[in-house]
Amino acid sequence: MYHSTMTIKRRLFFSNIRMIFVTGATFSLSTYLVRMIYGGSLSGPGGFQELNHMDLRVTIPLLILVIFTIIFAGVNSFLTHRMTRRIIQPLEPLGEGVSQIHANNLSYRINYSSNDEFRPICDAFNEMAEKLEATSEQKERDEKNRRELIAGISHDLRTPLTSIKGYLEGLETGVASTAEMRREYFYTVKKKTSEMERIIEQLFLFSKLDMDEFPLHLKELPLNRIISDMIEELSPEYSKKGLAILYDDPKEEIPVKIDVIMFRNVLVNIIENSAKYKTRPQGTVELTLEVINGFVSINVKDDGPGVEKENLSKLFDVFYRADPSRSLTGSGLGLAICAKIITTMGGTIHGELPESGGLSIIINLPLVEKEA
């Protein structure tokens, strides 16, 4: 059902009409009362003739009333016009703002300087536009990340899959004619399958962390001892890969709240990158701890090739690789997963370029406050 809308301008118009009507009625009633007081009537035969002979005590009040009515109507019309203009003017930029937002110009802002009732409305509009713009930009970034994620997954799964297919065809067509070649082909297929499995596992973990569907089980633990145990476990494995892991244990207990399994995942991802991208037969990773202003800073420094300075901020982006030639050796999800885990544990992570070369990954975790 259609309902007619009474505009502000129309409301003011009808209000003025009513006011003029009341003024006219007041004037007529006043004239009638004055005539009644002084005798006679303004109506009927000779009414106006009698009015012409009224003494000044009647004429002057009536004249004042007429003048008052004219002045009142003029002032009322002026003030109404002024009020209407002051109401309509702020609505025009608001209407323009709505049109701009509808046209997807989310950077539009209303410049309203008057300090009146419309100021909060214009400020609220600008705040809404700012949030819409931020949401739109975030949506574009998410869409870009989604496209990169799909492209990265496709690439990283296609590479080992192509290799597996080739070796299986070699087994099927008899290219691997000896038992030794078949064992070698079988070993390669198994290795590539493991690579695909790790990529899928990392992707699954990243997706769960990104959607906050992977709750961490935080426990208060001495970080220095946790890292010491992890290094003792990991050192033999990475020694075979040509990477030595050095750790300077401060001995003094450093209490933090962490998920041990996820923190181990972080260290493994960082150390795995150092082993994968080292340029010398024997590489080194050094871990040091330092307590600073209620946080413990974990510095994981390697002696590898490092990255360009402008690429430091991109290290933790999904599927980012500083060197395109590395695209055959990693999924690009490792450091992105590290950032998600550390952030969820209330810490921060970033990269630095040491003067001695290589790359440092700095992790800051909040210390557990000791009870007084």
Image: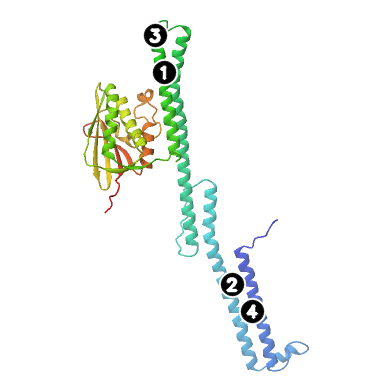
Q: How far, Cα to Cα, is label 4 from label 1? A: 100 Å
Marker disc for residue 190: 1
Q: Which residue is mark 2?
A: 77
**Can you give x and y, in whole percent of width and height, for residue 301 in the image?**
26, 33
Question: With 239 as the anchor, is 71 left or right in this view?
Answer: right
| Residue found at x 63% / y 93% | 57
Residue lying furthest top in this view?
177
Question: For the residue carrying disc 4, how many other residues have a C-alpha within 10 Å: few (<14), some (14-19), or many (20+)?
Answer: some
| Residue found at x 48% / y 41% | 139
Q: Identify the element where label 4 is drawn.
A: helix
Q: Which residue is mark 4?
A: 23
Q: Identify which amino acid the numbered label 1 is placed on.
A: Lys
Position of residue 341 relative to residue 1, above or below, is above
* Pointer 3 or 4: first along the chain: 4
Q: Which residue is mark 3?
A: 181
Q: How far, Cα to Cα, is label 3 from label 1? A: 14 Å
Question: For the residue carrying disc 3, how many other residues have a C-alpha within 10 Å: few (<14), some (14-19), or many (20+)?
Answer: some
Question: For the residue carrying disc 1, how many other residues have a C-alpha within 10 Å: few (<14), some (14-19), or many (20+)?
Answer: few
**Can you give x and y, in whole percent of width and height, for residue 362 in the image?**
29, 38
| Residue found at x 30% / y 43% | 256
**Can you give x and y, in whole percent of width and height, for residue 226 in the image?**
29, 36
